[in-house]
Amino acid sequence: MSNLTDFLRCLGNGADGFNIITHEGEGEYSDTAKIFCMQKKGDFKGLFNLWQEKVRSNQFELAHPETGVKTTALYNVKYGVVNFVFMADENNKNVWLLAQSALMINLAITFKNIYRSVFSNEKPIFPHIKNLSSINASEISLKKGGFGFLLSHPRPYHHFYDQLKVLTALDHDKPVLDRGSFFIPEELSKVEPGDHVFLYPNAINSLHISGSGVLLSREKDRLMERLVYKESIRLKGQGFAKGESGSSVCLWFGVTGQKRSWLDQVEGCICIVKLLKPYFDTVSLYVDGMTAIQGKRIKNKEDEAVFQEIRKRLLDIEGITINSLIGLDYREKILYCDSVDLFIANAGTGCMVPLRFARKPGVLHSNTKLFSFPDEYPSSVKKVSKNYVVDFFDSDSSSAAQNISYHVPWQHIFNLASDVLSEIKNVAIPKLDVPPVESVGKNGFNNFERKHESASQHFFNLSARLGKKPNSPAVLREVALAFEAEGDIQTAMKVMEKAYVLRPNGPVIKKKLEEYKSILKIQ
């Protein structure tokens, strides 16, 4: 039976001081075993019902993972994305620690062991364990105010779909502590820490939910999304007319200057808008990017660089208006999106506002591995065909979906958008021929290099020149240089222009663009 002082001392050794055990929970009946088992099975319904049971009590209680003794949440502390909650019995014995990141319980830490849930990612958790040893044992005592909920996550998807979705669906009167969140509904009470211990209202990541829990999870998604939407447009005022009518169209276009970007986004946006203009008197363009926490505005130079390139090339065309939504918060963005006719956005976090909150028609694009919101959608929501997608790894150390940028011919996206506009605006827009993607290979630059190995050593050597962790601008720069070495200056310039949009201050990129323009006699 460990006491607090001894337990804190053990934490000073970090994760290396414990036996790490993957705890699947089956065949055991402790509280943590049941939770781990539900998480493994993707049982969202069971986890949600457990939370509904817990909020009926003032204190948060679970049995010790090893001794089975009833323990109560005494104290929580947050490091990064991780919430650590100290548990102990009424005599401050049987001490243990639960760690929350994306799950109800990611880790259960006892005197000698760390029990991990099957889907747990320890990378954001392990580095902070040793920091816990600096806590004074006298600070850890039973909070008379009981427990409440903590809303705090730096990534919008996890804020809305791990935390807020569960919290807004629970029937409770618990206090809610806001620590820099993207959206806090007005109906939730906001408090200072006071005499409470706070837990994340997590259950399990939506992508791991299975069985009957899928339908329940989607129901809770929609309840949360409707609440967010209604609150955002409730104060709708002058300047936010509901939708463009007649021969006008309002387009939402999502961009990203960071990883996991559509590499053709600048050229694609410009060409799509120009080709739509003859069919409408006016085209209003909202360019979306990074989003601020509630009540704030932020700057993002990478996204802004993409916006400025688009703006520069559309600014002087009569009948086209361009506005940036980059750096606004979700309430403002949803308010603007309420007037949108059509969106074009990535199928990750970038589509949350138009697809999930405002429920607009549009086109989703992505790499071949990422689609954050599987669901049933109307015919006015299109998704690019994987036959037209070519993946490019932002880092050769990982093939995870978040590390893959991609090429999609903008003509394919234009054709999907024209189908949507035909349905919602009754406008017949001719389809375009879509160029083949075979020239860059079905699996990104690696296959592209192998395909041209016999013809060109320049492309074959791309991987060596890029180093261990190339990013999108570096990849594009090196491909442009390879085309230059082949004597194809026109293609080299087009590819280098894409690199310039993502890295406008790159000295090699700027220098080479000037050289190509001089060779091609472009002013």
Image: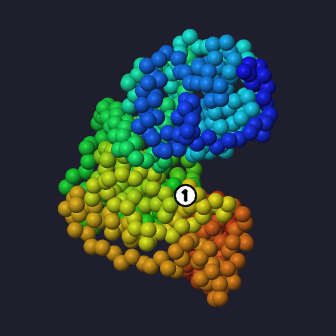
SS at circle 1 = helix
Residue at image point 67% right, 69% down: 511
- Residue located beneath label 1 in the image: 401
Query: Relative to 480, is 2 on the left or the right?
Result: right
Please, which residue is most extreme toward the bottom here? 455
| Quadrant housing residue 81 | top right
Compared to residue 116, the image places residue 520 above or below, namely below
Residue 128 at least partly seen: no
Residue at image point 75% right, 24% down: 7
Please, which residue is most extreme toward the top here? 144
Across and down, in percent, residue 105 comes to: 57, 35
Across and down, in percent, residue 512 comes to: 65, 72
Q: Quadrant of the C terminus?
A: bottom right
Residue 132 at least partly seen: yes
Near mark 1 (Cα within 10 A), the count class, few <14, some 14-19 or many ≥20, is some
| Quadrant housing residue 371 | bottom left
Query: Relative to 101, is 415 on the left or the right?
Result: left
Give the image's coloring scheme.
Answer: rainbow
Across and down, in percent, residue 199 comes to: 55, 27
- Kind of residue at badge 1: Ala
Residue at image point 73% right, 29% down: 111
Pick the front one: 3 or 379: 3
Residue at image point 33% right, 65% down: 416
| Quadrant housing residue 313 | bottom left
